[in-house]
Image: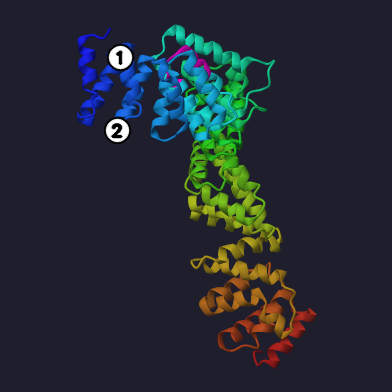
Amino acid sequence: MLDTTSKKLIRLLRPDLSSEVRCSAALVLGEVGTRDAELTDALCELLDDPDSSLRLQVLGAVGKLRIEGALKRLLARVTEGGPESEAAALAAARLGAKGTRGLQDLMPKVAPGLRRRIAAAMAGAGTTSAETAAVDALLDSDPGVVDAATRTLSAEIPSLTEAHRKALADHLLELLSNKKSSPLALPSETAVIRLLAALGDARAETLFWERTQPPHPPEVRAAALQALGNWVAAPAKDKLKRLLACAADADFRVAVPALMMLKNVPVNDRALADWLPLMEAPDVAVRRAAIEKLGDRDKPEVATALMKQLGHRDRELRDQALACLTRLEKGRQALARALLEAANPDEAWMLARTQAPFFRDYRASLREEVFARACTYLEAGDRRADALLFLVRDVDARGLRDRLEEKAMALRKKKDHARALAYLRLLGRDPACGAGVRFELAGCALKVSAHDLSGEARAADLSLQQFASLIHSHEAEVTESLRKAKWIEPEDLFYLGFHFAEKDRQERKFGGEALKLLVKRSPRSKLAKDARTKLKREGLD
């Protein structure tokens, strides 16, 4: 029998009152009412009221009061769709086993959108039968139904009692570990993992670890890794290897949760080899994280892995790797070694520019090795020498100039004029190069000249060009240097004098001096006879 309060509230449902008053009365009745026949009849009649707002409140009250007599009308309202179908499904699910069975029978007969609403309603009803049906809905072939049930069950989990949580976990664990039945569909397996993770049941950890590796699909692996994030702080060696393999996976969905779990895991030297593959991961974010973890370790294998990043297309990654390399002794050695072994001038220049800001901090023996290799390249006419010398020059330009000159003089004294010429030509590029070095350049070029007296050959001869330049800029010095240069032989003097004797003014005079010097040094030779003839012919005798 209704109490006085309920009777008053029923009177507030009359159609002559405002919608707000009627809705408020229906809401309160759903919370404090009982399943009295008078109240039941009153609410059931209002299920067809013209006021849609009131109908929604009545549907909620019918479900909370578990008025089983309204089930048939509730199921019909579900099939009609619209905004009231969801409220009707929730009300039916709250009626217990009978309402749940009615909704389950309805599932195959309605459109996909309504099936999802029914699944969500059963998951949120709060009854044992409805919850069991919602878990069963996780096995539905429609991913939308699975997702709707999962989201609603997840939202309900915080309000469950410990016993209720355990019962739900038992059911989900049975689904996940049952090897006798056919495997779960991808959406279903992912949903079960997500729900177990939300429940925080430690019994699921082993099942999650099993699903972190191939051949499980990326979606399942990602869900398992996200679930494990709640438990794993210091993984054992075998589990660490699994996480590292996941972090290096090509699928970003798998790599990210694994990477997040590894973020606070310390790295010891014994496990270093297991971590290094992360620097070859397809994803740039994984490589950056690996550099943050390993980039401060002065180990040859770390330096090798960092070197590989310098060719990556991502500029920030290259800069990060380079910064680490330049701080490590092994890194500097690796950079220098790569420079020394560069396959072509372009690669050499790339590596040289990369190291330029830090090259002066390299140990002296390493810089010396770079200089030695530069000399080897220079003598071989290899353009890679320019990149290496660029580094050495940046540290000590004056010292490099002196050393190049010393090597040139040493080679010239050994009569290795071709190799000496390589150094002298490099020195001659400097506008500040002195007359003495330029004379050595011209003299060595003369020694390797073919001494072809044809006009075309002489016009292209480097030695004659160098001597012409010296004559115009340092006439007195070049003549004096020629007299002192005992290493310039008669055939060289004849070629030199023959050419310049045919010129005008200063060059003509210099040509005469060269021919006279030849006559003086080798007066009885055939070249001296030819030199006298040339002097006479040119009017220089």
Mark 1 residue type: Glu
The crowd level at tag 2 (other Cα within 10 Å; few <14, some 14-19, many 20+) is some
176, 271: nearer the viewer = 176
Residue 263 left/right relative to 67: right
Q: Position of residue 455 (x, y in %)?
A: 71, 85
Q: What residue occupies the far right of the structure in this picture? A: 526
Residue 541 appears in the rendering: yes
**In terms of sequence position, does the residue under pointer 1 or pointer 2 come before the other?**
1
Residue lying at 60% horizontally and 74% vertically, measured from the top left: 466
Residue 124: in magenta span: yes
Magenta stretch bounds:
123-133
Q: Position of residue 308 (x, y in %)?
A: 60, 41
173, 520: nearer the viewer = 173
Which one is closest to the eye, mark 1 or mark 2?
1
Residue lying at 59% horizontally and 19% vertically, measured from the top left: 209
Q: Say which mark, if any, is on residue 38.
A: 1
Residue at numbered disc 2 = 51
